[in-house]
Amino acid sequence: MRAIRRFTVRNVLPESLAPLDTLALNLRWSWHAPTRDLFASLDPQLWQRVHGDPVALLGSLSPRRLAQLAEDRSLIAEVGRLDADLRTYLTEPRWFQQLEDPDKPDTIAYFSAEYGTTAVLPQYSGGLGILAGDHLKSASDLGVPIVGVGLLYSSGYFKQSLTRDGWQHETYPVLDPDNLPLTLLRETDGTPARVSLGLPGGTRLHAQIWVAQVGRVPLLLLDSNVVENDDAARRVTDRLYGGSADHRLRQELLLGMGGVKAVRTYCRLTGTAAPQVFHCNEGHAGFLSVERVRELVQEEGLTFEAALEAVKGGTIFTTHTPVPAGISRYGTDLIGEYFGGGAALEGVPLEKILALGAEDFEGGNPAVFNMAIMGLRTARRANGVATLHGKVSRGMFHQLWPGFDVSEVPITSITNGVHGDTWTDPQFVSLARERLTDEQIASGDGFRLPPEEGGLSDEELWTLRGRLRTALVHEARRRVRKAWLDRGASPAELGWTDDVLDPDVLTIGFARRVPTYKRLTLMLSDPARLTRLLTDPQRPIQIVVAGKSHPDDEQGVGLIQRLVQFADDAGVRERIVFLPNYDIAMAQRLMPGCDVWLNNPLRPLEASGTSGMKCALNGALNLSILDGWWDEWYDGRNGWAIPTADGVQDPAERDRLEASALYELLEDTVVPRFYDRDDGGVPRRWMEMVRHTLATLGPKVQATRMVREYVTELYTPAAAASRALDGPGHEQARVLADWKARVRAAWPSVRVDHVESEGIGEVVNVGDPVSVTAYVALDDLTPQDVEVQAVGGRVDDEDNLTDLRLFPLELTESYEGGRHAFSGTHVLDGTGPFGYTVRIVPKNALMDGPAELGLATSAS
Ligand SMILES: *Cc1c(COP(=O)(O)O)cnc(C)c1O
């Protein structure tokens, strides 16, 4: 085979149109409709052919067309206007600039294994990546100084098609970075910037850094496909979530450790302030903390322990799943290959790294290194992604904080959101903007406004909903036809695809990744009952389904096949369709066009879910199991809750019960309400729910709401801790590390010897004072090193304390041999069965809270 040297010929734009390059390279176009309209106007047919990709469009315009355009005065004016608009967007003070908190961070580095920003940059597999993309876009809108870090996978995730018999087929087209909205980060002398990591055997893994500009936010994507690497190393960034454990570990090392180096390089070359805050979005990037410890040990001379304190202060870990398969785990022997022997990092010994990810608790696997555990042990602040998920996570990781109640586990929650401008249909946006002020839209109040006062009428909203449904129907027909051609059908067989779906029929959507817990095929539990719903002569429903399964998940691939085979049946194929290759572009059509969005995960395994939020933004109603975000925000009027059979142990029985509840809701409530029309054909009661959804969920589901919460609740306190612990000299980190070592060493001897109380009989009257004195032994620790607490709470049936209340006791006397008395008097304000115990916990103003060390000793 002859060696072919590939290269890309780029169009050079005429001077008058030069700003088009900037407009194409900044991904703001992906959520700014006027910029997309401008690109479309350059050549509407070509725009269709390149699937709305500005870089591809500019690269494909013929020289003749370019010359024509260069003379078009009104076009030139529009290019200038949008260029100026972008510049304003990028530089004007926004929400963050107005925040008057002296602790707010200078820079936040945000790490994620995947990013879903636009269909043009397919570097995501599902919700986690889309969330990361929406996080960056919203941070940009708010002016939050984030730098994103990820990998550039040369084939991204796979493209999905179907075989004739409905089996998922994966292909991995190779992307050419030169044809993507990316620029290569270069040194001041013009050479591409490089980062590198040591590998076992003495070789190095090199990577270059592509920058995707997401509005104001740079996203650094590391790419190992460079000439300095051997073939194997070049393939490290080949695919998202593919390959052996060794392959994935190399990816995660590059993401975490290489990512920190990339941030340092970017900050140096652009004059960006060094980040105080490092946000690890799920465990894949956890090695970022190892790299930062290495920096402090090797460059600042800190001990490993002091370095870890400095690193933890500014680190935030977000957990995204209670499903074990969603968490990266490696054999400890594999970690040993990368961090032990000749590959060891000076001052960062293997056993200390292993301890960070060790499952050294009951039920853990001692041969496993767990990236989520490492995330939690290297971050002071951690969160789940919905209120229920926070609670589930506290239970799941409780073992890292033995001695504390589940409710005290320091994992909080911030409920996910979605980026409004990305996920609201442009037709909906223009109607709303025409009639309502920005304030009325943002608050949701505009959707309650009666038409007499300038609000939208039911008729108008219903007409718009119909237009969105119709657009989806046409899109689905096109995709079904294409899918069948790909499956080997001939055009002559496919006449029926013109009649797939009906623009007037109640349309239900179900699209998401296909892990088992999301139960793609729950709707097929009773095929006859579903068929009756689909084919009802008066009031039918229709269902649009999409989703990719991880290629190694045979069960998931099997579920897709079952669904496809059901949908292939001539009796229902015009009412239920499976659309291959679910991606952002499809989602943007699908969600606005559905009337109802179905979600039926196995509770409580859906951490948040976000697709239902995107639907809510467009006035579609959710029909969902009370899991993730829906558990929190379902209010009885914004959609429907599918009752769960919590506690039913047999999975098949549970599925059957929940499916039956789903059918019943559809038959008795959802379908009748959709088809209940007034004389003008408008379903008034349905529209009440649509309005209520737009007015109440619209503001809450915004990712700007989410990012504001991250800034005030996590980033800002983390920045303060980071400045204290990771500042020049690192004095506080050293002091804290020494103190923790002392506390850990003494703790086995710390105990509560004896407790006395006054005023506690069988019955205590509300308002009566209760006094407690505890005699404790602290060994070498001083009374200032600890807090002695009376822990009160309700006693449940199993003699456990719930609804904990903590009453700190004061030192009243010290005796010889490290013994002390602590006491306090408190007034109880609740009634009912109450109990208390006494507990000793470590105390230090440099810590965030008493649980940080996981140490607590209670009276026995
Ligand atoms: C929103 C979105 C998801 C996430 O869906 P969930 O409901 O959170 O499972 C996945 N894929 C695409 C393409 C999306 O747009």
Image (spheres, grey):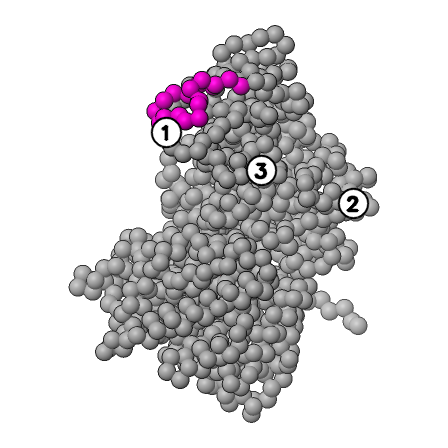
Give the side of residue 76 with respect to residue 806, left or right.
left
Mark 2 Cβ and ligand 1 under 8 Å apart: no
Judge the density around disc 3: few (<14), some (14-19), many (≥20) Cα neighbours within 10 Å.
many
Whether residue 763 is in magenta: the answer is: yes
| Residue 588 highlighted magenta (yes or no) | no
Could you tell me residue 275's position as x and y percent? 54, 38
Residue 729 seen in the figure: no
Circle 1 — which element?
Answer: loop
- Give the magenta part as a residue range: 755-772
User: Which mark is first along the chain, 1 or 3?
Assistant: 3
Q: Which mark is residue 829?
A: 1
Q: Earlier in the sequence, mark 3 or mark 2?
A: 2
Establish if 795 lies above or below 574. Answer: above
Residue 738 to residue 430: above or below: above
Amino acid bearing label 3:
Ala
Identify the residue position indicated by label 2 in the image.
333
Query: Gap between marks 3 and 1, in whole Å?
Result: 36 Å
Query: Residue 379, which numbered label?
Result: 3
How packed mark 2 is, by other alpha carbons closer than 10 Å (few <14, some 14-19, many 20 or more), is some
Type of residue at label 2?
A: Asp
Question: Label 2 vs label 1: CA separation?
Answer: 55 Å
Image quarter where the N terminus lies is: bottom right
The percent position of residue 566, horizontal first and vertical second, equals: 56, 78
Q: For this rendering, which residue is in front, 239 or 577?
A: 577
